[in-house]
């Protein structure tokens, strides 16, 4: 016996959380491909396989949708880095595992990084503020690591003085290297993490050892 139409339609319904994920996944793909302003809700609807009215009903306007994409991908990135850090390891290994987790996320979710660090910043406004909050969180994580290691070696005051600025420099370098990597995808996350460790950790280590470079 043929299933009645109402029953058939009911059987195809998905939980709201599943639909929202489906829409957000599609939106990230479309926004990364075109940028915020050129991206169309028609294409998001097509890629997601849902109607535009459903998108508006679940996630709101195009602006709301883009903001939800940014927040979701930012949370996913933070979770990936925090999960990847070996908190029981020495300070240098904590930084290494965090960087490796960061580049691992970018490798697996290139569209997410494009939306977060290129499209959102290009649009500015509220979107850029969300990225600045993400960056501040990353700087705070690195600062705590530097200050903790400096304090452990009896140089807490020096680490407190320069730790946040050095952490900001490292986070900026990590972001710039990730952007560069988008055009050089053959390199592994471990290689990029190693490059950045060699560029920055020697300086961090000198700081917490009390060795400071000064011009002659």
Image: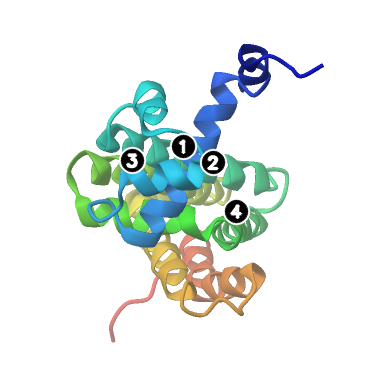
| CB under 8 Å between discs 1 and 4 | no
Residue at x-position 25% and y-position 46% = 128
Residue 168 showing in the rendered view: no
Disc number for residue 98: 4
What crowding class fits label 4: few (fewer than 14 Cα within 10 Å), some (14-19), or many (20 or more)? many
| CB under 8 Å between discs 1 and 2 | yes
Residue at x-position 68% and y-position 14% = 4
**Element under disc 3:** helix
Using the rendered view, name the quadrant where residue 101 is placed. bottom right
Disc number for residue 66: 3
| CB under 8 Å between discs 4 and 2 | no
Q: Indicate the position of residue 193 as horizontal and vertical percent values.
A: 59, 68
Residue 56 showing in the rendered view: yes
How many numbered discs? 4
**Element under disc 2:** helix
Disc number for residue 72: 1
Which quadrant is the C terminus positioned in? bottom left
User: 156 or 13: which is nearer to us?
Assistant: 13
Mark 3 and mark 4: span between their CA atoms?
Answer: 27 Å
Which is more N-terminal, label 3 or label 1? 3
Q: Nearer the viewer, mark 1 or mark 3?
A: 3
Mark 4 and mark 2: span between their CA atoms?
Answer: 14 Å
Q: Indicate the position of residue 84 as horizontal and vertical percent values.
A: 66, 48
Which is more N-terminal, label 2 or label 4? 2
């Amino acid at each position: 016996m043929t299933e009645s139409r109402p029953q058939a339609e009911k059987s195809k319904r998905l939980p709201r959380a599943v639909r929202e994920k489906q829409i957000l996944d599609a939106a990230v793909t479309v926004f990364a491909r075109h940028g915020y302003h050129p991206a169309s809700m028609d294409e998001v609807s097509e890629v997601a396989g849902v109607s535009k009215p459903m998108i508006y009903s679940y996630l709101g306007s195009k602006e709301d949708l883009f903001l939800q994409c940014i927040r979701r991908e930012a949370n996913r990135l933070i979770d990936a880095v925090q999960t990847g850090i070996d908190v029981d390891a020495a300070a240098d290994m904590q930084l290494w595992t965090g960087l490796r987790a960061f580049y691992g996320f970018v490798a697996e979710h290139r569209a997410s990084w494009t939306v977060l660090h290129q499209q959102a910043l290009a649009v500015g406004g509220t979107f850029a503020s969300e990225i600045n909050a993400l960056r501040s969180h990353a700087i705070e994580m690195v600062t705590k690591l530097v200050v903790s290691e400096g304090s452990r070696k009896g140089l807490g005051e020096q680490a407190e003085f320069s730790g946040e600025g050095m952490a900001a420099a490292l986070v900026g370098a990590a972001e710039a290297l990730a952007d560069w990597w988008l055009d050089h995808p053959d390199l592994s996350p471990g290689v990029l993490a190693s490059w950045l460790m060699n560029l920055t950790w020697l300086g961090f280590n000198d700081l917490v050892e009390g060795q400071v470079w000064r011009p002659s």
